[in-house]
Image (cartoon, grey):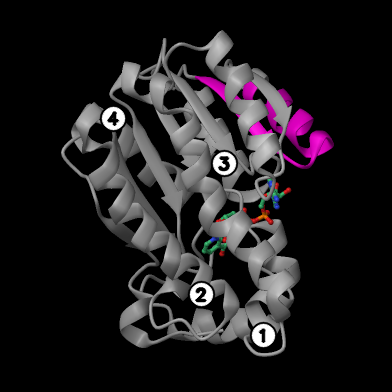
């Protein structure tokens, strides 16, 4: 890969698996130093190995995005070592199980946990890293979802709220020339999604698909690469749907 991000630093939350790992590889293999933050140290170690095998460098930090203390500690550590962060990818998220099935009966504690991880954590981390993002005139990417459009699950609600935060963050961070953009993937074939989504839904998706192939983690990582490159540098304050056109067909899980 051409090292178009040489000398740049990219922080990826949820970098231990799936889309986060694909983001780490996409930026690491193009010369960026990658900072991984996740609750899964073994998964992060595997991502780090893959980044290094692709010629990049990476470091890993355990951070629970539901914990303000963890976010504060991560930011302090990162700011001490990295005066500039070029891209913050708020990718960590809960998306399978009750959060994607239920809406009623979840109770206050579960709703608060889902909102903490998927919605509030991304904003708190960006706020804590602001000096380094400002130094780089950087980019914040919030990982939304196709489920944020007309949400019918707790998951969709957390991501719709994240879209609102994305617009608010674009406005609030603009004074430092920091952009904020949301990426809303359709159903992408990550190991977690493959395990967690019923086979009948994958088949239904395939039958409805406008682009006749399954969406991959690399499709999403490539969009992030574009947004972070000079060619994407005038895009701000948008939620970009990357679903092969499925929204038009009304695919819902
Ligand atoms: N795969 C899809 O089809 C799809 C579609 C739309 C949106 N998304 C979103 O993309 C993101 C990644 O999806 P994925 O398919 O790669 O999922 P995944 O489950 O493979 O990866 C999620 C990562 O987030 C980490 N994580 C979970 N809770 C965390 C917490 N509290 N603190 C820190 N890290 C935590 C996990 O350990 C994991 O490494 C999620 O935000 C998801 O909602 C995925």
Name the side, left or right, on which 252 lies relative to 222. right
Q: Secondary structure at mark 2?
A: helix
Q: Quadrant of ligand 1?
A: bottom right
Find disc 3 in the rendering and name its residue: 22
Where is residue 9? Give x, y as percent.
47, 19
Where is residue 94? Give x, y as percent.
66, 61
Of residues 137 and 36, the one drawn nearer to the viewer in this rendering: 137
Name the side, left or right, on which 205 lies relative to 54. left
The Cα atoms of the two marked residues, 3 and 1, are separated by: 29 Å
The Cα atoms of the two marked residues, 2 and 4, are separated by: 29 Å
Mark 1 and ligand 1: say if the CB distance to the nearest ligand atom is below 8 Å: no
Query: Range of the magenta residues?
Result: 33-51
Q: Secondary structure at mark 4?
A: loop
Q: Are marks 3 and 2 in contact (CB under 8 Å)?
A: no
Q: Are marks 2 and 4 in contact (CB under 8 Å)?
A: no
Q: Are marks 2 and 1 in contact (CB under 8 Å)?
A: no
Q: Are marks 3 and 4 in contact (CB under 8 Å)?
A: no
Q: Is residue 6 above or below residue 134?
A: above
Q: Quadrant of the N terminus?
A: top left
Let me know if residue 252 appears in the view.
yes
Pick out the residue farthest to the left: 234
Task: For marks 3 and 1, give the one nearer the viewer.
Answer: 1
Find disc 1 in the rendering and name its residue: 102
Find disc 2 in the rendering and name its residue: 156
Q: Is residue 120 above or below residue 204?
A: above
* Quarter of the view holding residue 228: top left
Q: Residue at x 20, y 33 (%)?
A: 231
Task: For marks 2 and 4, give the one nearer the viewer.
Answer: 2
Let me know if residue 197 appears in the view.
no
Name the side, left or right, on which 189 lies relative to 240. right
Q: Secondary structure at mark 1?
A: loop
Name the side, left or right, on which 228 lies relative to 80. left
């Amino acid at each position: 890969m051409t090292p178009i991000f040489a000398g740049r630093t990219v922080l990826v939350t949820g970098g231990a698996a799936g889309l986060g790992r694909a983001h780490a590889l996409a930026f690491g293999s193009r010369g960026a130093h990658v900072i991984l933050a996740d609750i899964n140290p073994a998964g992060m170690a595997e991502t780090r190995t893959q980044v290094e095998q692709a010629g990049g460098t990476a470091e890993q930090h355990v951070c629970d995005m539901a914990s303000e203390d963890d976010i504060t500690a991560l930011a302090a550590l990162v700011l001490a070592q990295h005066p500039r962060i070029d891209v913050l990818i708020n990718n960590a998220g809960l998306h399978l199980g009750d959060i994607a099935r239920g809406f009623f009966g979840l109770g206050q504690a579960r709703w608060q946990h889902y909102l903490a991880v998927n919605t509030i954590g991304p904003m708190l981390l960006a706020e804590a890293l602001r000096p380094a993002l400002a130094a780089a005139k950087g980019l914040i990417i919030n990982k939304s979802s196709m489920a944020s459009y007309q949400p019918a699950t707790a998951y969709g609600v957390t991501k719709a709220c994240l879209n609102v935060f994305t617009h608010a963050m674009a406005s609030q961070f603009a004074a430092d020339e920091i952009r904020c953009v949301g990426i809303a993937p359709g159903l992408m074939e990550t190991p977690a999604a493959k395990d967690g989504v019923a086979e009948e839904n994958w088949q239904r998706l395939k039958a409805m698909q406008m682009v006749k192939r399954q969406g991959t983690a690399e499709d999403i990582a490539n969009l992030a690469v574009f947004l972070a490159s000079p060619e994407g540098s005038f895009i701000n304050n948008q939620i970009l749907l990357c679903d092969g056109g499925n929204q038009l067909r009304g695919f819902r899980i």
